[in-house]
Structures are given as C-alpha cells and as structure tokens.
C-alpha cells in the first residue's frame, strides 16, 4: 500500500481521478469554468453590465457603432453576455455562501439527533419533518416577502429550507457510525460528546456530505434563479440570472436570446455540479 | 473410477481480475478433478483465491474476472465454450452453490415457499403438486421442523441456522450433481455449525452429490471432506487425501497453519502456538519463486527463489499427495523451527484474597417496545433479560474467559463493567470501589485508564478517517493528562513497538492502509495506553485469519504478563479459551451454566451445555478423536420468551421432562471454585467420558471410517 501523501498531491490525485471519466471531466470542466468566469468577470466582460448600448440587438450582430454583441442585448440595451458574466458572481457567491449555514445547522443537529437518539432525536426529527412538509417555494416566498429581498435574506431562507434535508442525511449517517466500535472506544476512554461528534463521527460522514454539498449548491443556484424570476431575488442593479430571465420573458417569443442564454448559464452550472457530485459518489463507493 | 470422465475438472486454470491498476492474478495454474461422490475441501486464508476458484467453476466470475489460461470441464465439456443458455441450464440445476451469508442469499420480500418453488419452476418441469412434494421432502431432509409452516414464513422470521438449512435445501432441490459450498457455516454459532456439518455429511451420502467445500477452518474440512487442497496466494500448495495431508503435512505453510491452531484437548504448555511470521503478499507484488518463501523457516536462497516458480511435486508419503515445495524430500530431515516456549504464568497469582473485579448478582433487563401503539400506551413493553443473576470475580493477573454463543449476554456484561450501560440490579466493584452506578462519563481518569477494552472487528476498532498515530497519541494523552505533547508521542511510539509494529512506518498511516492483524494490534496497543489493570477483550481474534490469529493471541499473552494486568476474554472459541485462560465462565441465555478453572471445565463433569459446546469444536489435529454423539438440536429460544425452567431445557440432550422445563436448576458446587448449574446429580455428570481423547499413534478408527 502507498504511504500517506501530502494533502495537496492527494487533492490533485482526486481531481485526476474525477477527470478520468468523461462525465466527471465534463462536470469538473463546467464547474471550474464558471468559477473561473466569476473570478475574472471584470476582465472577461466586454462591456459594463449596466451600460446602455442599443436595445434589442440580436446575437452575433453589430450595433450602429459597429460593436459586436455576441449574445445580443436586452430590451433596454444592455449586453447580455456581459450581464451573464457579471451575473456569475452573485449567483455563485450566494449559492455557495447560503449553503454553508444550512450545512452548519443541519449537520450539528443531525449529529446530535443521531448520537443522543431518544427524545433529542424525536423532537428534532419532528421539527425537520414539519419544515419539510411545507412546499419549499411557499416557504421561500413567505420568508423573503416577510424579510424583504436581499442577499442575506436569501441565505436565511435557504438555511431554513435546506437544513432539514441535511439534518436527515447527517442523522442517518450518524446512526450508522455511532454504532461502530471506535465510537465505543472513544466513550470508554472518556472523550467528551463534542469531541466524539465532531472529530470521531463527522469526518467519517464527509464522503456523502461532499456529494450532497455539490448537489445542494446547484439547487441553491436554481432557487436564487427562481427567486430572481419572481422578482424576489437580489436587488435590481446586480445582474442575476433569474431576474434576467424574468425581464426577458415578455420578449421571449420574438427575442428568445434574452431568455435562453441565462437559462443555459443556470443549467450548465447545475449540470456541472450534478455530474461532479455523481463522479465523487462513484469514487467514494469504489473506496 | 479412473476410466470415468470426471464430473468437474479444472485444468491449468489461471484467473485474473482487471482493476484500474492493471490485472491482478488471483489464481495461478490451478488443477482439480472431481469425480462422482468425491468431496474436495479447499482451505486457505482470506485472499488466497478460493472463492475465485469456486466462482470460476460455474464460469460466473463477473465482469472484471478473466480466465487467462486453462479450461474447466463439466462432464467432459468445456464450460468456457458454452453459450449463456447452456450455462444457465447447468448453474443451479447441475451445479448448486451454498453461500456464506444465509440472510443475504434469501430474498427478504418473498416467503420461503415461494423462493423454493422458484428454483423448481426455473429448473424442472415438475407439476405444482410434485414440486410441493419435493420441496417438503427436501425440507425434511435438512431436518427443519414443520416444513409446511416454514414455507409460509419470510426469511427474517426464522433463525440463522434455519436460514442456512433453507439455503442448503434450495441448493438441493434440483438434485444437483455438484454442490459448491462457500464457508457455509462461518456466520453461525458453534453448536449450530456442528448441526449443519452433520447434516451436510448425511446429505452427501443420501444424494450422492459431489461437493467442493471452501473454508478457512481446517477442522471443518477434516470433518467433511476426503480430499484437500491447501491454497496460498493463488497457488495450490498442497493437495492430497485429507487424512494424509493432516497427518503428514508436507508444505511448510500447511505445517504452519496446523501449528497456529490452539488445541482444546491439550494444555497450553504441551502445544504452544507458533505463529507464521509476516503476512500474505499482495497479489500484485508476490515474491519470486515460492510465494511462501519470505515467511518460511526453511527458505533456502538459490532454491526457493527460483524465478521459474516451484512445481507441485509428489511427496514421499503417498502417491496422491502433492506439495509445492522445493524441499519436499528433505523437509523431514531439516531442523524444525524452534517452538516458542509457552508463556508460563504464575498460577499462584490467583490466590489473591481480594478480587480485582467482583460482580455480584448482576441483572440487566432491556425493555423493548413492540410497536408504535404499544409505545403510546406505554405499559406494554416486553422485557429481555440479557443478564440474569451473574456473579464472577477476576483476580489480579488472571485471565478469565466468558464463553457462549451469540445472544448469551456476554457483550452486555462487558458493557455493564465498562459503564456504557447500567445494571438493573446487583453490584460491580473494581479495586474495592463500587462502580455499578458510575457511567463512563462520571468515572475519573484513573478508573477509565485501568479498565479498557479490545474490540472484535478490526475494521471498526479504528476510526477510518484519523491516522493510527493520532488515535494512539490521543488515548495516551487522555489517560495521562500530565504528559506533554512530546512525551505522549514518545509513549505512543513505545506502544507501537510493544505490539511489534514499527512506528516509523505505521505512525502516520490511515487504518485503510493496514491489514486486519495490524489494525487489531493497534487496537490492542490503544487499550494498553494507560497501563490498565483489567482489559476486556471481546472476541479479540475471531475476525482474523488463522495465521494472524495465533500471533495476536501470543501478543495478548505477552502483554498480559509484562503489564501484569488481568484479562477478561469474551469468546465463542473454546480452543482459544483453553489456550489462554485460567478461569472459564460458560454462559447461555444470560445465565451462568458452569464456571471453574480451565482444567475443570475441559474435563468431566460437564454441564450438558459445556459438553455440547466442546463436542462441536472442529478439530484439525488427527491425533485427537472426539465424541460425536452430542448435538444440540433446535435453536436458541427467543429472548422474549425463554424456557421456564432451565434455559437450556428446550435443546438439552439430557433433558428430564417434568423437572428441567419447570424448575430452574440449582447451582451445584463440585469444588471451591468449580460449580455447575444443572438438575442432574454430580455423580451422573462425573461418569461421562471425556470429549477428547488423544491417540499417540494417530490411527484412529473413526477417521478411516469416515
């Protein structure tokens, strides 16, 4: 067996492993592509996302001033490509940022429920089921309408709606792991519950959790899109993909590019994450 | 016999598995001939390729298994050239397989009757009534009571032993000519295993099926098979008649294996264990020449590392006895490896007046809610009495064993001592301190470090996501809070050395990079991190391979002596118990059936349960013969509804009607230390012959007859 290696080479090996299957490669490529676009958005975008150039230009055509608009412009004259490129930043930022607190709450409570069982589990599971029994969209609407549309309120809404699902995954994993001998060994040597939960149990749940995290970032991106579409997303000046689709909706029949390209952006990002999650899952189950 | 075409024949068979890192040769140049009525046993440790051979014999290797050379013939026809349809006709119909895990071999969603009928519907054209008849007949043959009732049950409604009988019945339904058995009893308790072995032997005679029996247990093979193939790292290293191989083992590996098994019929000092050093080479990194070379005492450079490999050659003992050893002919004259001295322990240490651990009349009941509705009405809970009036003492430096089958409450007892559970009544005192109400959370560091545990499953005993070095250092710091980080690390290094693992190599490894035996060693070193005075070992070696088992047993023995701690061993393996312990407690269904010094337990008078347990031990040593008139029939009673009188009364071979099933048996004292819980008078029990007899001339009649 190979000797342990540094974490950097390990990460590199895992990435190589993922890229060695075609779907894994595609997933990794799409995900890294959008992360790259988000980081270098100002350098990549040909125009400012708010600059009014010329309304309703079709894709791959020139404006009166001879500027090439690859993806055309929208109804008030902003470049669609630049808006999509700049839109990656809020979408990626908030979808990843909103998933973390959901994970923190979901896994802490899931660990507690799976480890202590009995009434802790009964009560927490009941609350989780209660939240899960609400239609998610209605839940989002209620929260956002109540708190007002803003980035941090999206985080609150997503945390509230996603943590029960994470809770259930972590709880199930904990129930399994907590029955193993090394947990007994830790109890027998008098470890504190916090140590057992976060050092002994949680790292062993990381495989399924990483997979779920990738999927959930994708779902959150969709959610942000949906909220944007409903006019409840990020406040207007920031170009998020959902609100782009919404504003293009009345023109969708004769100017479809205003709707289609943001849609492709969302779905390729989510597809990339899904494929990546799938491949990680494959690799996990192989080990 | 020799003119007849053999039923199943493997010729120069080599099998490889394709993996991401290239092909792995699992089986190399394997030959085997099975005639009608033959029974061949394949014995070897995990990873030697025995299951691969078995699957290949049905041409059922799966996607990544490739037969790289050689051929398999069934009744003279090559299996490799057959179409899928022809193969399907043969599998399950002419060749049947019995799997290791009965629970996973049966479909939990279908009734047993349905699953049995399916076999006949698929493989025969019997009418429904004929099928019904044959099914019932077969169920009778595997000695299942009330076949009609059992056919309406689902698999989870019957016990493990019954499930295995169903799996055997299923394999027999189509009246196969060849029966393949893959460790059919490994998942079962000893007494149940013994029943199944007897069943297989009688079925072999009734149906005249030929069989191939795979096991890691040499004793079982000796009881079931006439021919034997010993496999090591993909090679057949020794073949021949079972009795020839066992009486004159010619390959150093076979010899080593036989020396690794503790004997239940001998004093430890008469038969010290000599473990095989090293471990099985990985399939992608086998040594040159003899694969066993690096582990072999007789290894000779220039001879045993012949790059062309070592051929399977005739031994001087018998024309049909072959061995893959370059030194077969001179082996007998060579000096045997020095047998290690059996650890001799001062028996006087048991004379301490104050026991280290004293358990008095412990009872532990579990309340189980039957269903959602009963949990709402709260009063209707059922009670399982996991421990019932258990008393025992462990003195300083003593090794006490608790023996019993699954469900006898031995693990519950360990949990009570360690403070993971609280007893329902009774008291436990450790070092004159009452600890029965102290849960592990409320115990202080010194108590915790003095009472530690070794776990059964090497794959679960270590946290897979933390390095072993970290885990040991953590335990050291937990038990010795005064140590600095550096000192704790030093102590952890010492612990690694103590269990003979080099800390330079292993310290930073994750558990997945360790073999089972190495993991178990790390688990043991963790228990010794705080210089414990009592270590509880729950089946410490049962999940390990034979050759690894003995070295771990020796390690335990050594540590116990050096650290002068007491050991409480929980085990179902009587050979191990005999080898290791000073004092034995036999448990059944939460009751103590017999307790006494190890010598008294292994000789008459016996409690009938002890007697049955002993009789069920498979023995590989041909110089020992065993009484075979005792089999515990039936199954372990449901813990919800134990028998009224003696717990054993439903299965006992000495059952007295009207007494055993109504009145709990008295505990009869044979000596100060030896007591038996049974209705039968001591004198009657004393008149029983011993279970094991040793014949020095190794020629015993039973052996030749079977």
Image: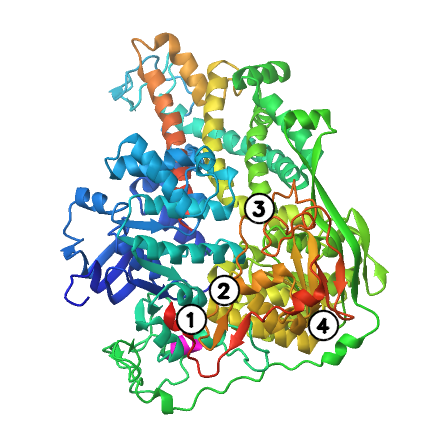
Range drawn in magenta:
B252-256
Upstream in sequence: badge 1 or badge 2: 2
Q: Secondary structure at mark 2?
A: loop
Q: Marks 3 and 1: same chain? A: no
Q: Residue A132: give x, y in percent of width and height.
A: 57, 23
Judge from the rendering whether residue B615 lies leftward or rightward of residue A271; answer left or right.
right
- In this view, the residue in front, B271 or A216, is B271
Q: Residue B313: tell me if it is visible.
A: yes
- In the picture of the structure, the residue carrying the numbered disc 1 is B702
Q: Residue B415: give x, y in percent of width and height.
A: 70, 53
How far apart, in angstroms, are the residues tagged by discs 1 and 4? 38 Å
The answer to the question of whether label 3 and label 1 lie on touching residues, with beta carbons closer than 8 A, is no
- In the picture of the structure, the residue carrying the numbered disc 4 is B398
Please tell me how crowded label 2 is: few (under 14), some (14-19), or many (20+) other residues with Cα within 10 Å.
some
- In the picture of the structure, the residue carrying the numbered disc 2 is B628
How far apart, in angstroms, are the residues tagged by discs 2 and 4? 33 Å
Please tell me how crowded label 3 is: few (under 14), some (14-19), or many (20+) other residues with Cα within 10 Å.
many
How far apart, in angstroms, are the residues tagged by discs 1 and 2? 10 Å
Per the rendering, the mark at residue B632 is none
Which of label 1 and label 4 is nearer to you?
1
Which of label 4 and label 3 is nearer to you?
4
| Tag 3 subunit | A
Judge from the rendering whether residue B97 lies leftward or rightward of residue B532; answer left or right.
left
The answer to the question of whether label 1 and label 4 lie on touching residues, with beta carbons closer than 8 A, is no
Q: How is the image coloured?
A: rainbow
Q: Residue A36: tell me if it is visible.
A: no
């Amino acid at each position: 067996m190979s000797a342990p290696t540094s974490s950097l080479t390990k990460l590199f090996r895992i990435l190589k492993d993922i890229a060695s299957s075609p779907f894994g490669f595609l997933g990794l490529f799409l995900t890294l592509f959008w992360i790259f676009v988000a980081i270098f958005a100002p350098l990549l975008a040909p125009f400012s996302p708010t600059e009014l150039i010329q309304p309703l230009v079709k894709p791959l055509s020139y404006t009166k001033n001879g500027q090439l608009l690859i993806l055309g412009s929208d109804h008030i004259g902003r470049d669609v490509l630049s808006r999509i490129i700049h839109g990656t930043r809020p979408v990626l930022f908030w979808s990843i940022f909103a998933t973390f607190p959901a994970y923190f709450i979901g896994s802490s409570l899931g660990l507690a429920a799976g480890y202590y069982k009995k009434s802790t589990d009964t009560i927490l599971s009941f609350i989780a089921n209660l939240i899960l029994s609400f239609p998610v969209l209605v839940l989002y609407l209620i929260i956002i309408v109540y708190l007002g549309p803003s980035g941090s309120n999206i985080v609150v809404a997503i945390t509230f709606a996603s943590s029960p699902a994470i809770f259930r995954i972590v709880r199930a994993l904990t129930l399994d792991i907590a029955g193993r001998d090394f947990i007994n060994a830790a109890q027998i040597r008098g470890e504190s519950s916090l140590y057992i939960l976060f050092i002994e149990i949680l790292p062993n749940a990381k495989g399924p959790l990483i997979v779920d995290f990738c999927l959930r970032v994708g779902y959150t991106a969709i959610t942000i899109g949906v909220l944007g579409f409903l006019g409840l997303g990020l406040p207007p000046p920031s170009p998020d993909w959902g609100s782009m689709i919404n504003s293009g909706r009345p023109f969708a029949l004769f100017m479809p590019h205003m709707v289609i390209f943001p849609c492709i952006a969302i779905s390729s990002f989510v597809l990339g994450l899904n494929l990546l999650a799938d491949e990680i899952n494959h690799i996990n189950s192989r080990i | 016999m020799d003119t007849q075409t053999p039923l199943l024949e493997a010729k120069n068979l080599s099998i490889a598995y394709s993996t991401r890192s290239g092909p792995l040769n699992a089986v190399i140049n394997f030959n085997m001939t099975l005639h009608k009525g033959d029974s061949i046993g394949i014995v070897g440790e995990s990873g030697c390729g025995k299951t691969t051979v078995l699957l290949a014999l049905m041409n059922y290797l799966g996607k990544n298994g490739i037969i790289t050379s050689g051929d398999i013939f069934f009744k003279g026809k090559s299996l490799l050239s057959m179409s899928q349809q022809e193969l399907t006709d043969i599998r399950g119909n002419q060749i049947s397989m019995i799997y290791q895990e009965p629970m996973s071999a049966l479909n939990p969603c279908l009734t047993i009757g349905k699953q049995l009928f399916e076999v006949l519907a698929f493989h025969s054209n019997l009418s429904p009534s004929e099928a019904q008849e044959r099914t019932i007949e077969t169920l009778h043959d595997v000695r299942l009571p009330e076949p009609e009732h059992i056919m309406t049950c689902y698999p989870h409604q019957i016990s493990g032993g019954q499930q295995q009988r169903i799996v055997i019945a299923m394999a027999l339904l189509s009246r196969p000519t060849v029966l393949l058995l893959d460790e059919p009893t490994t998942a079962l308790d000893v007494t149940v295993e013994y029943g199944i072995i007897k069943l297989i032997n009688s079925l072999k005679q009734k149906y005249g099926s030929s069989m191939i029996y795979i096991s890691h247990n040499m004793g079982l093979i000796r009881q079931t098979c006439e021919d034997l193939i010993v496999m090591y790292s993909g090679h057949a290293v020794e073949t021949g008649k079972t009795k020839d191989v066992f009486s004159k083992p010619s390959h150093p590996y076979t010899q080593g294996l036989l020396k690794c098994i503790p004997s239940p019929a001998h004093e430890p000092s008469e038969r010290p264990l000599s473990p095989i050093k090293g471990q099985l080479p990985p399939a992608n990194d086998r040594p040159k020449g003899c694969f066993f070379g690096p582990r072999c005492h007789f290894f000779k450079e220039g001879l045993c590392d012949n790059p062309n490999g070592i051929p399977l050659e005739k031994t001087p003992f018998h024309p049909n006895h072959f061995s893959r050893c370059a030194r077969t002919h001179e082996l007998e004259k060579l000096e045997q490896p020095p047998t290690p001295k059996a650890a001799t322990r001062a028996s006087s240490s048991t004379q301490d007046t104050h026991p280290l651990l004293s358990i008095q009349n412990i009872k532990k009941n579990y309340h189980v809610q039957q269903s959602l509705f009963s949990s709402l009405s709260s009063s209707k809970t059922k009670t399982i009495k996991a421990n019932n009036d258990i008393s025992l003492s462990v003195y300083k430096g003593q090794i006490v064993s608790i023996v019993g089958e699954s469900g006898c409450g031995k693990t519950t007892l360990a949990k009570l001592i360690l403070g993971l559970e609280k007893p329902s009544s009774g008291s436990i005192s450790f070092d004159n301190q009452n600890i029965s109400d102290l849960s592990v959370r409320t115990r202080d560091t010194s108590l915790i470090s003095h009472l530690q545990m070794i776990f059964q499953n090497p794959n679960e005993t270590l946290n897979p996501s933390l390095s072993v070095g970290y885990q040991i250092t953590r335990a050291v710091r937990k038990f010795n809070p005064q140590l600095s980080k550096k000192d704790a690390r030093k102590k952890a290094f010492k612990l690694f050395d103590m269990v003979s693992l080099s800390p330079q190599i292993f310290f930073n490894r994750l558990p997945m990079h360790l073999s089972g035996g190495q993991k178990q060693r790390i688990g043991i070193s963790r228990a010794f991190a705080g210089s414990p005075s009592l270590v509880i070992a729950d089946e410490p070696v049962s999940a390990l391979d034979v050759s690894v088992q003995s070295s771990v047993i020796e390690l335990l023995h050594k540590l116990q002596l050096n650290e002068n701690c007491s050991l409480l061993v929980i085990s179902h393996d009587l050979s191990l118990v005999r080898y290791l312990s000073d004092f034995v407690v036999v448990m059944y269904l939460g009751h103590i059936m017999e307790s006494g010094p190890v010598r008294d337990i292994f000789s008459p008078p016996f409690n009938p349960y002890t007697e049955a347990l002993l009789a069920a031990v498979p023995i590989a040593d041909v110089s020992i013969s065993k009484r075979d008139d005792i089999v515990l029939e039936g199954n372990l009673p449901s813990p919800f509804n134990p028998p009224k009188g003696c717990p054993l009364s439903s299965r006992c071979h000495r059952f007295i009607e009207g007494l055993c099933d109504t009145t709990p048996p008295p505990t009869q004292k044979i000596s100060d230390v030896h007591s038996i819980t049974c209705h039968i008078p001591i004198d009657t029990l004393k008149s029983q012959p011993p279970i094991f007899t040793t014949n020095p001339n190794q020629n015993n009649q039973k052996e030749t007859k079977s």
